[in-house]
Image: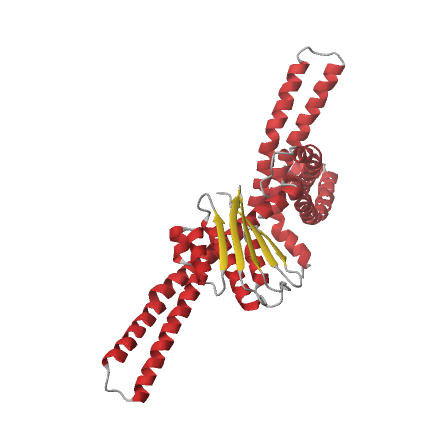
Amino acid sequence: MKILPRLRRALTRFPRDTAFLALGAPLHLLTGFLLFVIFGSIWAIIDGGEASAPVILGFLVALTALCVPALTAAQRWRFRQLLGVRIPRPSWRHPWRQLGYHSMTGALFGTLETLVVALLLAGVAAALSPLWIYALPWQWRVEHLAGSTQAIYFASAALAVLAAVPSLTAALVRLECRTSPTLLGPSRAEALARQVEDLTESRAGAVNAADAERRRIERDLHDGAQQRLVSLALNLGLAKATLTDLTPEAREVINTAHREAKEAIEELNNLVRGLHPAVLDERGLDAALSGLAARAPLPVRLKVDLPQRLPPQIEAVAYFVVSEALTNIAKHARDATKADATVIQLADILRLVITDDGLGGAAPGKGSGLTGLAQRVRSVDGTFRLSSPAGGPTTMTVELPCAQ
């Protein structure tokens, strides 16, 4: 006989679902019982009953308040262990959601769970009634032949009821899985806030990992390829100075190779400084920007006002911003003859203002690297603003949070 897929799944999960409902019934009904007793105490006070009713009422209210966190933890454990459903730990800033669940929704679920479990037990007991009749003495069975026949009817009806119990159990479990996690877990606002915190932490980890990777690349280039190029340039210079009997063609080849080796060293130095200059770690942002301004292809007036060292991540972003801005001015700013760069710390904000006297017209998305620059600033929760009207000047303003 072929069993329907849904019924097969219900039968497979039936032991687990039954244990889930059997464990949930007392947990759900406990708060309902406490509230029932509380209402009884309130009625006794209104009716002018026992003098100890207010004391009992206070004790019951305190007991209910203490039971709510424990019941919530027990429900979360029940869902996690039996169904594999993980409910995040709720915040107790708004305990009314959990109290409302245990006193109202939980009481309804507890009633339904009790009915389903009771139906299962009654069905099993009725289905086994012929066996109980058979266990009695044969004289009783002969004298009560109608009772034996009724037991067979009861067993047949019980088997029909038991056939429906797995579907009822599965339906009730699905209903609880859809409603309980929403009420027992954190609210939507708390879940969003927690998600924002997780995303912020993961983003900070990604930025730190990227900075560490840039430092590793800078270190490998400085200790590996750069040293090899320096050795090559020295050997070529030594060959040019000592080998005097070469033909003019061979000497020209050595001179060209020597010149290209020195140019490659200079380009590699610029690349290493662009990745993460060593002076930034050793002497801070002020010294690194001073060296950057001195190497710029146009005059740069630099003003730095930093009362203390900044977090390494912020220093790296600030250096990258100024470096990329000066590079953009040299490459793309039309008729620019000078640039101003101001770096100042205002409380927990590091403000960078870079200005040039070009003809303006700069805008993100035109191939000038401004889009990547804005993304790098936003990676540390900074703000990026650009003003570049036609005719100039162009002013870039960046603010970075620098709280220690």
Residue 362 screen position, x and y as percent: 62, 64
Residue 266 horizontal side relative to residue 244, left or right: right
Which of the 4 image quadrants contains residue 243?
A: bottom left
Q: Quadrant of the N terminus?
A: bottom right
Question: Can residue 344 be seen in this snapshot?
Answer: yes
Question: Can residue 85 be seen in this snapshot?
Answer: no
Q: Is residue 180 above or below residue 58?
A: below
Which residue is at the front of the view, 274 or 133? Answer: 274
Residue 209 horizontal side relative to residue 3, left or right: left
Question: Residue pushed farthest right?
Answer: 47
Residue at image location 46% in from the left, 47% down from the top: 310
Residue at image location 47% in from the left, 52% down from the top: 315
Residue 258 screen position, x and y as percent: 33, 77
Residue 253 horizontal side relative to residue 287, left or right: left
Which residue is at the front of the view, 186 or 81? Answer: 186
Which residue is at the front of the view, 126 or 43? Answer: 43
Residue at image location 70% in from the left, 46% down from the top: 168
Residue 112 screen position, x and y as percent: 70, 39
Which residue is at the front of the view, 161 or 75? Answer: 75
Residue 159 horizontal side relative to residue 257, left or right: right
| Colouring scheme, one of rainbow, by chain, secondary structure, one colour | secondary structure
Residue at image location 64% in from the left, 57% down from the top: 387
Q: Is residue 145 above or below residue 290?
A: above
Q: How many numbered tags mark residues here? A: 0
Residue 83 screen position, x and y as percent: 59, 47
